[in-house]
Image (tube, helix red, strand yellow):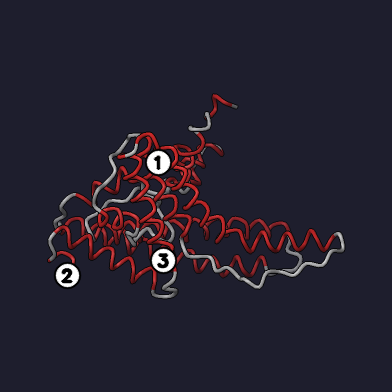
Amino acid sequence: GVYWMLPHRWQNVFLIGAGAVFYGYVHPWFLGLLWFSATLDYVAARQIEVRPRQRRAWLAVSLAGNLGLLGFFKYFNFFADNVGAVLEVFGLAFARPALQVLLPVGISFYTFQALSYTIDVYRGRIPARRSYVTVMAFVTFFPPLVAGPIERAAHLLPQVERPRRFEAALARDAVFLILWGYFKKLVIADNVGVIVNKVFGIREPGFEVLWAGVFAFAIQIYADFSAYSDIARGVARWFGFTLIRNFDHPYLARGPADFWRRWHISLSSWFRDYVYIPLGGSRAG
């Protein structure tokens, strides 16, 4: 209610504050990483535009900063454990680092979302935004923050900048989308999860029981993941935003390639557009 009583600029400020509360209420230091990514990409994009001769260097700064943080927090513990395991095979003593890195929630999602802004500015597809508030509201927009869908700057930034007015029809649709998401999560995923845990807890399950567990797990993981996407899309719609659809009946796919296009669409399309095609796609082998 407060949000819809505010003028447009203060709506964006409100969303930044909401993102801070939503993302920082368990571990406030997580906010430092989120705000660092937003600030880094705001500065890098502005420099790419005003210093065209140094645009490649500023893109490298954005990539190194964002992917460096992602790699450190995502893989430090994994790397340390595996180095220790290899050294122990050869009989070498290994003192595991005392540092235990806590993985920030959703760091992959907001890192890829922020990078889409810098890369698209570098490619000349969108202009760099002068408003720091606009970029912060885009990166820290809380509904998709911890589990997607991963939004593109070209899709979400114009919605941040456009004046938004309350529409009862959209709010009603949002409620149904949120309730459908909760139904998939609480009624389907959590209850099927009980079956999965029992099957995978059996020491030597029979063939039929094992395959029942496999199919149950397929239902559980789809209902759980797509449920969050639906809830995020519904909550975003409450605030006047439209997020992309993240799942399109993936288990009706005709093959692996079709499944890849239907499952976690925002991630698969992100890698297609920002990694696969720039490296040459199918033309480069």
Q: Are marks 2 and 1 in contact (CB under 8 Å)?
A: no
Q: CA distance from mark 2 to mark 1?
A: 35 Å
Give the left or right position of residue 242, taking residue 24 as reference: left
**Picture coordinates of residue 88, whole percent (x, y):** 82, 63
Q: How many angstroms separate mark 3 from mark 1 (CA)?
A: 22 Å
Q: Are marks 3 and 1 in contact (CB under 8 Å)?
A: no
Closer to the camera, 32 or 56? Answer: 56
The residue carrying mark 1 is 119
Q: For the residue marked with disc 2, what is the amino acid?
A: Val
In the drawing, does residue 198 fall left or right of residue 206?
left
Quadrant of the rendered image containing residue 84: bottom right
Q: Residue at x 42, y 43 (%)?
A: 58
Q: Is residue 164 above or below residue 57?
A: below
Which residue is tagged 3? 32
Q: Quadrant of the C terminus?
A: top right
Query: Who is closer to the viewer here, 244 or 208?
Result: 244
Residue at image mark 2: 2
Q: CA distance from mark 2 to mark 3?
A: 26 Å
Crowding near the residue tagged with mark 2, few <14, some 14–19, many ≥20 C-alpha atoms within 10 Å: few
> Relative to residue 156, is residue 70 drawn left or right?
right
How packed mark 1 is, by other alpha carbons closer than 10 Å (few <14, some 14-19, many 20 or more), is: many
Q: Quadrant of residue 172?
A: bottom left
Image x and y of residue 95, in percent: 75, 70
Q: Pinpoint residue 104: horizontal percent, then vertical percent.
A: 49, 65
Please name the amino acid that badge 3 sits on.
Gly
Q: Position of residue 123 (x, y in %)?
A: 37, 34
First in residue order: circle 2 vs circle 3: 2
Left-right relation of 173 to 256: left
Residues marked 2 and 3 touching at CB (< 8 Å): no
Residue at figure coordinates x 47%, y 47% from the top left: 63
Residue 204 vs 282, above or below: the answer is below
Question: Residue 73 got which mark?
Answer: none
